[in-house]
Amino acid sequence: MSEQQTKINWKKWLNYQSIVKQVPFFLFLALLAVVYIYNGHYADKTVRNINRTAKEVKELQYEYKAIKAEVMFRSKPSEVAKAVEPLGLKEPAEAPIVLKDSVEKN
């Protein structure tokens, strides 16, 4: 008898009307599957963008440090003197003269 009852229960669940009743649920499950797959692809794309941006930032940091070192080197007084020597400019040998107003203010 128990075998007949399980067969009857399966027949109850597998008839046309019960399957039609379950269609919205199956559609909901399909929608969840699509959202889950999309979320995985979106996460992978975001991680790739983050890694690419991090690589660009690292390259720009190296470039910044190289340019900064170059500017610091070229701004040394000896390097500036070498750079302006072809223009006929020379470094003054004596200290600058301080000018004072001859009329004192009271």
Image (spheres, rainbow, N blue to C red):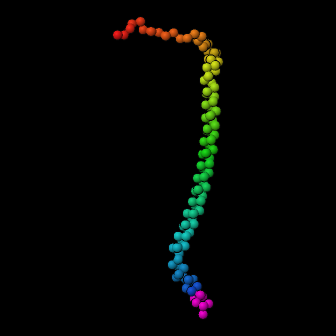
Please state the horizontal and vertical placement of residue 49, each as a whole percent of the image.
60, 49
Q: How many numbered markers are drawn? A: 0
Is 97 placed above or below 3 here? above
Is 17 placed above or below 51 here? below
Asked whether residue 11 appears in the rendered view, the answer is no
Quadrant where the N terminus is found in the figure = bottom right
Question: Which quadrant would residue 27 be assigned to in this image?
Answer: bottom right
Please state the horizontal and vertical placement of residue 18, each as a whole percent of the image.
53, 81
Q: Main secondary structure of the magenta part?
A: helix
Residue sticking out furthest to the bottom: 1
Please state the horizontal and vertical placement of residue 35, each as a whole percent of the image.
55, 63
Compare residues 23 and 84 and report the one nearer the observer. 84
Residue at position x 63%, y 26% in the image: 73
Please state the horizontal and vertical placement of residue 7, each as a whole percent of the image.
60, 88
Q: Is residue 29 magenta?
A: no
Residue at position x 42%, y 8% in the image: 101
Residue sticking out furthest to the front: 106
Q: Is residue 3 magenta?
A: yes
Q: Is residue 73 left or right of residue 104?
A: right
Compare residues 57 and 86 and report the one nearer the observer. 57
Quadrant where the C terminus is found in the figure = top left
Residue sticking out furthest to the top: 102
Q: Which residues are magenta?
A: 1-8
